[in-house]
Structure formats: C-alpha cells, structure tokens
Image (cartoon, rainbow, N blue to C red):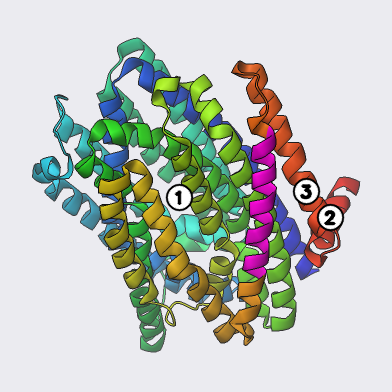
Amino acid sequence: MKEKNRTRSSLRNILFSLMGYVFTILLQFVNRKVFVSLLTTEYLGLNGLFSNILSMLALSELGIGTAMTFALYKPVSDNNIEKIKSLMMLYKKVYSIIGWVVLGLGAGLTPFLQFLIKDMPDIPYIRVFYLLYVLNSGISYFYTYKRTLIICNQDAYISTTTTTVASVLTKILQIIFLYLTGNYFAYLIIQVVMTRIENIVISGIADKQYPYLLENNVQPLNEKEKAEIKDNVKAMFCHKIGNVVVNATDNIIISKVLGLSAAGLFSNYVLIFDNVTNLSNTVIRATSSSVGDLIAGGDKGKSYKVYKDMLFANFWIMCFCACSLMCLTQPFISLWLDTKYLLDMGFVIIMAACFYVSGMRMVTLVYKEAAGLFLPDRYKALVESAANLAISIPLTYYLGISGVKLGTLISTLMIPFWIEGYVLYKHYFTKKVFTYILIQIGYALAATVITGATYFLCCHIQLVGYVGFAIKAVTCCLVSNLLIVIMFYRSSGFHYFLGIVKNRVRK
C-alpha cells in the first residue's frame, strides 16, 4: 500500500509540476517578447547579471534547505509530530537570519556594481533596480521552511500550484504594465509584491494543513541532533559553493569580459534552456519525497531497482529534451524575437551537451540527498568551482560566449559527474562504481546517435517560418522517441514505466 502511495504521490506531483510549468513557460516567453520590444538589450543583460549576483548571495543559505529536507524525512515518515515541531522551530530561526543576511549583503554590494560590468550603460536608477532585486530575493527566505514541510509530506503539488499561480499573475501584470508604461521600475515592483503574497499564501496553507506549527510548546533539539545537522550543513555549504560558481557566474563573466549586450543575447538562450531544465528537473525532483520515504524504509535492493528504473526515465527525458533544444532553439528564437538575436550553432550544441550532462546527474543527486550522503564528496564542489573558473574565463576571452558553457561542460565531466555516482554506489548501494559508469556511457552513446540522426533530418527540412518550425518539432518528437523505443523496449526500466502509464490510463 505504501509503495502505491509513493507512486501516486510522485505521479500527482509530476502532473502538477508539468501543468504549472507549461503555463509559466508560455507567459515567460510572451513576457520576454514584450520586454525586448519595449526595452533595450542592456536591460536584458541587467536582468541576467542581477539574478547571478543574487544567486551568489544565496551562499548564505549554506545548503540548509537540503540538510533540512533530509532531517525531516524520517520524522515525517514516522509521523513524529514533536520532532517535526522541533526541527521547524530551528529552521524558522535560521531562515529568518538568512533572509536578513541576504538583504544586508545584497544592499552592501550596491556601490560596486560598476566593477561587474565592462561598460556601464546609461540606464537611470540602475542601483535602485538592483536593490529591488535584492529585496525580492531576501523576502523569499522568511517562509521557505514551511514550503519544505509540505514537500516532505509528498504534497509538492501544493507548492507547485501556489508558485505557478503567483508566477502567472506576475507575468500577466508585468506584461500589462510594460505595455502601458514601458517602465522597468513598475516591472520589478510587481515582482516584489507578488513574491510577498505567494509567501504569505504558502505559509497560510502550511499552518492550516499542519496546525501543530502554531503551537508554542516546542522542545528544542538535543545536542547530538544539532551536531548531526551542523555537520550536514557544513558539507552542503561546500556543495553550494560549487553549484553557485558553476551555474551563477556565467552572466557575471560575460558582462565583465564581453559587456551587457552580449549578456542580453546570452540570456535569451538561458531563458529557453533554463525553462526546459527546470521542467525536466521538476519531474525528477517531484519524486524526491517518495525516494526519501523509500530509503527510510531500509530496503536497499528494492531501492536500487527503483534507482535504475528512474535513471532510464531520466535518460528518456533528457535525451528527448536535448535533441529538441539542439534542433529547435535557433528557429524558435528567429520566430520569437528576430534573427538579430541569434548566436552561432556551435554555442547551441555546447548548451545542449551541458543540458544533457547536467540532467543525467539528477536521479543520482536525488538519491544522494535522500540518503544523507553530504559528507563523502563535500570537497568535490570546491575543486569543481575552481576548475570551472580556471577553464571558463580564458575560454570566454578566446571563444566568446561559447567559451563560458564549454568551460562548464568540461569541468562537469572532469569532476562531479562520476564522483557523485561513486559516492552513491560505494556508501549507499555498496556496489562497484564501474557499473554506474558503464550505464552512463551507454546512455550517452545512445543520446549522441539519437540526437545526431534527428538533427540530420531536421537540417534537410527546407521550409521556414511557423510551418517549418512545426514540421521540425513533429520530426523531433517522432524520430527521437521512436529511436529510444527501438533501442530500449526490452529494458526493465522501459517496461516498469510502461506499466505505470497503462495503470494510470486504465484508472
């Protein structure tokens, strides 16, 4: 019965995640179209630069969110209300401090913005715009702990729904105000107000769903429990540094080396790839609470079988998405914005490779986090971040925008991609990592063949415009998925998920 509940919760969370992202993504692209029509490319660069700076400030979170989620899995699974209350009291205090630290550090960086931009643009109130970004980021921390409890209870669809509704309303209001006023200040104010409203709503839902959060008789955690959480937080801080340096410095490097206009062009591609990344990762992450519950049950044999089945599903999603991104990104930007916003095809290929490699780590990361394996590879992220900067900065000078993502691809393949598998296989599954490497190599070769064949066919479609794009999209959908079925229809992972789909269709 519990396994059925896990499957049902995962499918429900995935369904709501997909529905939410479809609405959000559509509005994001409409929002960006209006943005580039009414504001200059430099404003796009500012958006990307400010987002990256705030991602750097997110280091103050120290990885507490992941450690918090892991600590909650067991008491949530056991319905240990008193332990949950104790943990939530601790996290409320910690996240309040983090929120104020982000606000303080972010505001403190205001006088130094000119050092992060090659040529400071003639944009009035640029520092006021930055402070609004800081405010929007800082206030989001004050209710994060309640959202995490909802997710740990396998109700991620509730969080997804509130985020989607808030995001849709935000984008609609921003589009309306941009059309009416062309004012970037109003655009940012709407973002701040809606973030605040969303936080209040999710807090109210959590209080109603878990009324014990409002109780005052809360016992503090003992010293042993605090020490365990502290150790995990220390390890996650190292992981956090690596993640931020690898993923949140691209716009900063481009802005400093190539200027805000280049960062603006880059941000259009990032919007597309990030949306697909978030969509695909959300599908995998929607299973994290169920994986945590499965691991808490203690059956490693069953857990390993589910892991391999999930890895196949992960491959199918990433291969199809990477194939579609490589074939459709350039014609989509031509239709969506204009050909003047295009970068070269070599950059798109590198971006697609980065997308696939990063995406194929997701199931392993979900299992590592659910198993609490934060300590064994804590220094991996520090080495990765140093390697990423050492490779990306020179390549940016030499290759331009393509150099940034090529540096990310190289450093990811060199360090985290295989170390994460090694840690999971050694410390949780107690198996040889060679098996993991062979599985990943096999999937990578299959993805290369499938993507290459599909791209070859799309290149021979001479039609342009909306008709040409539609034909290429159908080609991507049919050819890539047909090749995956032909290659893997005998695998256990294929039959496992085919069985789930059949059961859901019958119901």
Residue 81 visible here: no
Comes first in the chain, label 2 or label 1: 1
**Apparent side of residue 505 relative to residue 320 in the rendered image (left or right):** right
Q: Which residues are magenta?
A: 439-457
Q: Is residue 358 above or below residue 236?
A: above
Q: Amino acid at mark 1?
A: Ser
Comes first in the chain, label 1 or label 3: 1
User: Image point 25% across, 44% down: which residue?
Assistant: 134
Q: Residues within 10 Å of mark 2 (few under 14, many from 20)?
A: few
Q: Amino acid at mark 3?
A: Leu
Place residue 261 in its image quadrant.
top left
Residue 248 is situated, as x and y percent measured from the top left of the image, at 33, 52
**Mark 1 — residue?**
203
User: Image point 35% across, 79% down: which residue?
Assistant: 230
Q: Decide: marks 3, 2 in contact (CB < 8 A)?
A: no
Q: Is residue 168 above or below residue 255?
A: above
Residue 343 is situated, as x and y percent measured from the top left of the image, at 41, 32
- Residue 483 marker: 3
Q: Residues within 10 Å of mark 3 (few under 14, many from 20)?
A: some
Q: Inspect the magenta stretch and tell me whether residue 178 lies in it.
A: no
Give the camera-side residue of 362 and 335: 335
Give the camera-side residue of 322 and 75: 322
Comes first in the chain, label 3 or label 2: 3
Q: Decide: marks 2, 1 in contact (CB < 8 A)?
A: no
Inter-mark Cα distance, 3 to 2: 16 Å
**Apparent side of residue 347 relative to residue 137 in the rendered image (left or right):** right
Inter-mark Cα distance, 2 to 1: 38 Å
Residue 497 is situated, as x and y percent measured from the top left of the image, at 79, 58
- Give the foreground label among 3 and 2: 3
**Mark 2 — residue?**
498
**Secondary structure category for the residue under label 3:** helix
